[in-house]
Amino acid sequence: MAIYLDNAATSFPKPEAVYCRIDEALRQAGGNPGRGGHQLSLDASRIVFTAREAVANFFGISDSSRIAFTSNATEAINLALFGFLQPGDRVVTTNMEHNAVARPLRALQERGVEVVKVAADRYGFVSAEDFCRACAVAPTALAVLGHISNVTGTIQDLVTIGPWCRNHGVTLLVDAAQSAGLLPIDVETLGIDLLAAPGHKGLYGPVGSGFLYVRPGLELVPLLYGGTGANSHSDLMPEVMPERLESGTPNTPGLAGLTAGIAWLEEVGLAAIREHEIKCMSRLLAGLAALPDLVLYGPGDAAQCGGVLSFNIKGLDPSTVAFRLDQEFSICVRAGLHCAPDAHRAIGTYPVGTVRVSPGMMNSPEEIEEFIAAVATISSKN
């Protein structure tokens, strides 16, 4: 079987309980949740409610009804941005963001929203002081921050930025695509007003699952309009959460798998997961740094980054390196711009990009060594 080191794209393999729970939901709870009073519809509704409660407990959310389920983090981010911002609003973000943030903001900019991007250094760090200063120089409706870069793995200083935004009345949207399930996130402690995350990465759920948390008191304009299973007499969307932001049949099997993934995380413990990630990243950093003609990007310290490392081999296109790793060594990584061109501009790798390796909890030390040896072989033949 191939060595999978592309967990920043989606985690694989999943815990066995995730597969089992999805199968069980498909076979035994096949009704449409909230769309009937019969037993199979009620069974499906319980799965959705249980998933909402699991997400709320995991992220320190006191009211699970403030969680809207989505198909991925991109949908959640779009729901937040288009649902909150109005023409004339000012947004502060960074140049390390994924296109899931950058592209909606570009579209909103064309509609009259002002977008300010705070620059990162060459390691991908955005100064909390610079970010907060940018928010303070003019009335700012929204701050948007990716917790961990999907290019360099850099962990941004949310511990400082979040409470500052809360204390200064700046609404904060956090993209937790790379941090959910790896770092502890408590929405109240960190001052998060809007939290977007996928289910299929660090939460070890299946693809097609994600969510947006909306702080009580914030009211968003829906992105989708349609059936919600309630208030069917009206052609207006419900005012209450989560129905206001959830139209159409939810992904019941996916949410069952997401619940199982979160339960597995809680059983293993975030401390153990983080410890494993740091060990993998430390070995990758040391092993790759020892190779000639290799250029590493990002913090260079496993404690300062998530489970993402970018590198290049001098004289070789990153796509060539990734292709050879796949074809000659059965190792799966990702090459290119990783849907984050601004981040690559910040670290000096635009337009060719980098090779990205992203280990996960299911990777063994032996697999990390095989990867380092494979890169060494490719580098030596360059």
Image (cartoon, rainbow, N blue to C red):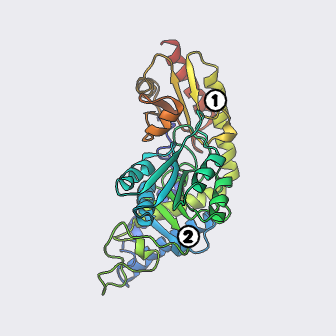
Residue on which disc 1 sits? 285
**Marked residue nearer the N-terminal end (1 or 2):** 2
Q: Residue furthest bottom?
A: 233
Residue 4 position (above or below residue 82) = above
Residue at the spot 49% in from the left edge and 63% down from the top edge: 212
Residue at the spot 58% in from the left edge and 38% down from the top edge: 124
Residue type beneath disc 2: Arg
Residue at the spot 45% in from the left edge and 65% down from the top edge: 84
Viewer-closest of 240 and 327: 240
Is residue 26 visible in this depiction of the protein? yes
Secondary structure beneath dot 2 equals loop
On the image, the x and y values in percent for residue 239 come to 42, 80
Would you identify the image quadrant in which residue 180 lies?
bottom right
Mark 2, Cα crowd under 10 Å, few <14 / some 14-19 / many 20+, is: many
On the image, the x and y values in percent for residue 365 come to 63, 34
Give the label on residue 215, or none: 2
Disc 1 to disc 2: CB gap under 8 Å: no
On the image, the x and y values in percent for residue 105 come to 42, 53
Residue 327 position (above or below residue 277) = above
Residue at the spot 48% in from the left edge and 53% down from the top edge: 200
Residue type beneath disc 1: Leu
* Disc 1 versus disc 2: nearer the observer: 2
Give the label on residue 134, or none: none
